[in-house]
Image (cartoon, helix red, strand yellow):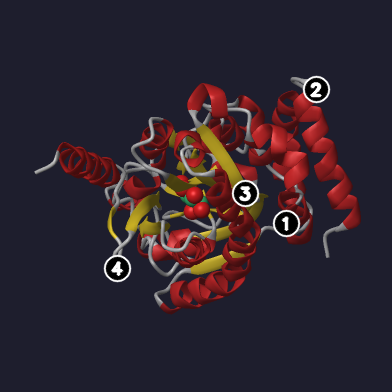
Amino acid sequence: MKISKIVTTAAVSLLSLSLAACGGGAGSGGGAKTIFKLAFNQTEQHPQYTAGVEFGKKLEEATQGRYTVKVYANEQLGGQADVIQNLSNGSVEMMWVGGPVMESYNPDFVVYNLPYMFDSVESFRATMADLDAMKELYTSIEESKSITVLAGVYAGSRNVYNSKRPINTPADLNGLKIRVQQSDSQVKMIEAMGAVASPMNNGEVYSALQTGVIDGAENNEPTWDALKQSEVAKYYSYTQHLMIPDYLLVSTKVLNAMSEEDQEAFKKIVPEIQAMASDGFQAFTESSIEHATSIGAQFNQVEDKQAFKDLVQPLVDESINANETRKALAETITANNAAHPAK
Ligand code: GCU
């Protein structure tokens, strides 16, 4: 064998090794294909799953098969707080993450995790669609953590549910142990509303409810129902305290390792995927309510939401006024609320 041939063979093996290391393998067209693992903590019925699969198809087309995406649902790659560390070190390439998890990486993300910030779904979506206004925040942890935020999507509004009783007033929450997402803002929020906070991973909530470790949680209807929490916490009360984005993340290192042309193609797909994930949420919410009702869940409207708002207002004020960046981000929300008031 000629030296040049040996060198080529060695280079090819090295290439396949590195592709295997980032989840790649031989593509069906015979060319090398790199597969980005996209971690997801919910089921295949969720619109973010469908949008992730679509991202893969579009990326494959746009890069002539050089790249694609495989979505790993149901926390197969771990809970969000762990997965984001793996994304930061480059061993997971992409993920969907709940907004509060971002606070440990840059506390300014808190602006979007505070209660009663958005007056309407339209205001929320207009805020998320303004990628220019979000750009600084989205790229703020690229250098330090190798995390790039691509887009925020609509993930419903969050309400309190529990196994004991309907919640109508803050007093009804007294003494109840309520699971929240793992961040400072979420703990402070639920405690201000009158409950005892219990932060944990989404995947642990069902058994914590079942064993009585917690009395309830707060989430959108699809998460509550698809993860079977509706079987063990049947009182779902419309406090409507939160509208929080889920973000699509990519490892900065992984993104930068693509050619400029492929990076362009990758970024161009984002707005379409963002819209797709957000659009699908309403129908998913309706079918979740229907299913939960069929298994005996009980819904109640909260007449006096102002009572909850008043209790969390100091937290909102303190969090927003902490620095100029947050004030500016909150101002764009105020402007969008004025343009898209509550109906
Ligand atoms: C929602 C959200 C998830 C998040 C989950 C949670 O389902 O879409 O990103 O992980 O809530 O409460 O943990």
Tag in front: 3 or 4: 4
Estimate the spatial distance between the alpha carbons at disc 1 and disc 2, rounded to whole Å.
23 Å
Please tell me whether mark 2 or mark 3 is closer to you in this view: 3
Where residue 79 sits: x, y (%)?
36, 43
Please say if 279 is above or below 77.
Answer: below
- Residue 188 lies, in percent from the top left, at 58, 30
Residue at left offset 43%, top offset 79%: 294
Type of amino acid at the residue the image marks with label 1: Arg
Which is nearer the N-term, disc 4 or disc 1?
A: 4
Quadrant in which residue 168 is drawn: bottom right
At numbered mark 3, what does the secondary structure look like: helix, strand or loop? strand
**Could you give the CA–CA distance between mark 3 and mark 1, rounded to whole angstroms?**
11 Å
Residue at 75% x, 34% y is: 313
Task: Describe the element under mark 1 as helix, strand or loop.
Answer: helix
Q: Which residue is mark 1?
A: 125
Q: Earlier in the sequence, mark 4 or mark 2?
A: 4
Name which of mark 2 and mark 3 comes first in the sequence.
Answer: 3
